[in-house]
Amino acid sequence: MGTGTHFGDYRVNQALEPQPCYKSSVERRRQMFNRLLWLSFGFLFLVPIHLSAQYQTIEIEKVQLARSLAAMVLDPAGSPIPGVLVEEFSSDWKESLRSTKTDATGGFTFAPVKGRDVYFLQLRINGFDPLRVRVKIDPKQGKNLRLKLELAT
């Protein structure tokens, strides 16, 4: 059965000689490259990657006249956006007074507050730049408000 001595269930090989390594330099480089490649891919999975859009708040400077405190929120293509957070703010934009979300058709409505002339509204949803708009209710000269959000870049 070959050279060696038996000790019970164990076999001891007496002829342990180092085996010569005949790998060429090309094979060694390829093996090193493969190790580095796997190490690099493994490192990518360990490092958290955070990709997010840059948001820029867009403010419509001119006060918008509307028939009521209701609007349709649209994307750049004109499609309604459901789930947009619509907040009414104080006149200095520091305090949120009330909020709602757009419905499945992209619409929202706030009840008017007696004695308030101008409403400061901010609209936000992931993927779009926040929009700030001031709205004044004028049932005679106002229009049905349609607000278009811009995609964040």
Image (cartoon, grey):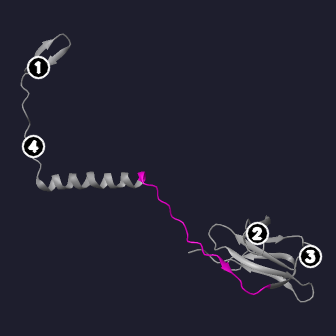
Residue designated by label 2: 86
Cα gap from disc 1 to disc 2, whole angstroms: 85 Å
Tag 1 near tag 3, CB within 8 Å: no
Residue designated by label 3: 115
Helix, strand or loop under label 1: loop
Cα gap from disc 1 to disc 3, whole angstroms: 105 Å
Residue designated by label 4: 21
Cα gap from disc 3 to disc 2, whole angstroms: 21 Å
Q: Position of residue 148 (x, y in %)?
A: 71, 79
Which residue is drawn at the image coordinates 89% and 89% (left, top)? 141
Residue designated by label 1: 1
Which residue is drawn at the image coordinates 9% and 19% (left, top)? 4
Q: Position of residue 29 (x, y in %)?
A: 17, 55
Residue with the most extreme top position: 8
Q: Give the residue type at disc 3.
A: Gly
Residue 59 is a magenta residue:
yes
* Magenta-drawn segment: 45-63
